[in-house]
Image (cartoon, grey):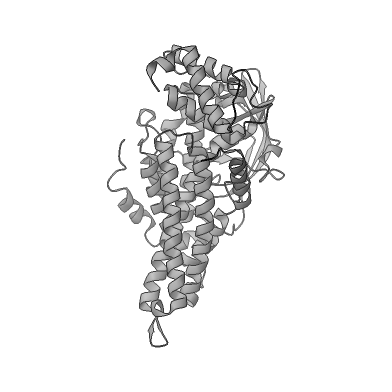
Amino acid sequence: MSQDLATTAEGIEQAVTAFVSKRVGADVPADQDLFESGLVSSLFAMELVVHLEQAFSVQILGDDLKRDNFRSVQAMTALVLRLNGAEQPADA
Amino acid sequence: MPELPADAREFVDDLVGDRAAEWDLAGLIPDDVLRSLATRGLLCAEVPQASGGLGVSSAANGEFTAYVGSRCSSLRSVMTSQGMAAWTIQRLGNPQQHAEYLPKLAGGQLAAVAFSEPAAGSDLSAMTTTIEPDGDAVVVRGQKVWTTAAHYADMIVVVGRYGSGAAAVVVPASAPGVTVTRVPRPSGCRAAGHADVRLDDVRLPASAVLGGGQPLMLLVTTALAYGRLSVAWGCVGILRACLDAARHHARARQQFGRPLAQHQLVGRHLANLLTGEQIATRMCEHASRCWDSGSPDMVVASVLAKQVSAVQAAQGAAAAVQVLGSAAAHEGHAVERAYRDAKLMELIEGSTEICQLILSDHAVSMTAR
């Protein structure tokens, strides 16, 4: 993952879309609700957490683990952007 | 990454010696044994150095966990609980909570994690324990059962319902309203301090709440991920102890004019034990590599490692009992303990059947490879 990709909203959204689509074996629109569509189990939700942390060098702790942050590719993109912008990992 | 202290295994050997059978029969590990391991940070060796821990890799801690497990599964089980408590705090806690709790866990205090309830075992989504905000405080109410290491614990990480989601809360065992009652004579890991924990209107500062509002099953999956891999490595230890006992006995014991090992039906048991130990080791090594590289596969790999290792340990221990015959057929013998302990490993941190359900879900949802 290049630094460019990891710092722009577009780059993050593309990378997250690619990961999710590959994992579920289908094209996933950025605004699709992953939980309502039944695409995401608890196991996959945790995979998403670990993937975002690794791919974008962020730490997702405490309150940031709430479901809304992982509801869609858009929500995850916003989370990564916010954590990347912060000096410290978000306080819970 | 930092290494474990070079004398860590020797330290365990000195502490455990030949006393594991005695602890099993008494159902207790002496407090000084647990404290001296905890004080050195060895019960949760993956806690980062920045938080006062040893900061070793999952692979290194896994091999160490197997080593402890080969000596005493009860002690290894306490280690699993301590590590899982630390991991849950690390994962769900904020930086202030890391600073508050992790140095204590790496520096001598003991911890347990409470999930199961009378009506919520395999179906943890049925748990009814509540963590309710009340001004600057929270009130915890509920009944937890079979909490490993709770008898020894200074702090108990309790998972419960919080608002529309879930949270974990760090409960001092000494807090008013907490009652810890040992499970009388458990069938396996008898000295691991299994206990039921009653929480009657336990009032704590809100700062004791880890996370809050996460979906319950995400929280449970997160906390259990560490526990599963730790149990899996513990099962590798059980298999190593059984293989060792079986091969020594099969070389030394003569029947029908030759060593047992030269009887083919006994030889098959030895081959199966070696195979089981190797399969379990490889699964655990893979899962630990996933943890150490931050791979999302760590979640599934940990379930797989737990599933495979617990089944192999139960089969391997049964084979070892068969090879040793009357030599191991008395309470407290390493192989007899392994037989009871391994079976318990098929029940906890997700029974074999629950792990199979998780893996079948994964098989259905994964893409073609």
The x, y position of residue B112, in whole percent, is 53, 41
Give the number of callouts.
0
Residue at the farthest left position = B6
Quadrant containing the N terminus of chain B in the rendered view? top left
Please report the residue visible at 52 percent of the width from the left and 67 percent of the height from the top.
Answer: B318
Q: Position of residue B223 (x, y in %)?
A: 54, 36
The residue shown at (41%, 65%) is B243
Q: Which residue is nearer to you in this view: B12 or B6?
A: B6
Q: Residue furthest bottom?
A: B257
Residue shown at the point (42%, 45%) measured from the top left:
B286
Q: In the figure, B136 relative to A42: above or below?
A: above
Give x and y (percent) for residue B159.
61, 34
Examine the image and state in which quarter residue B131 appears.
Answer: top right
Q: Residue at x 41, y 79 (%)?
A: B260
The answer, for residue B104, to whether it is visible in the render is yes
Q: Position of residue B333 (x, y in %)?
A: 47, 67
Closer-to-camera residue (B164/A52): A52
User: Is residue B201 rendered to the left or right of residue A3?
Assistant: right
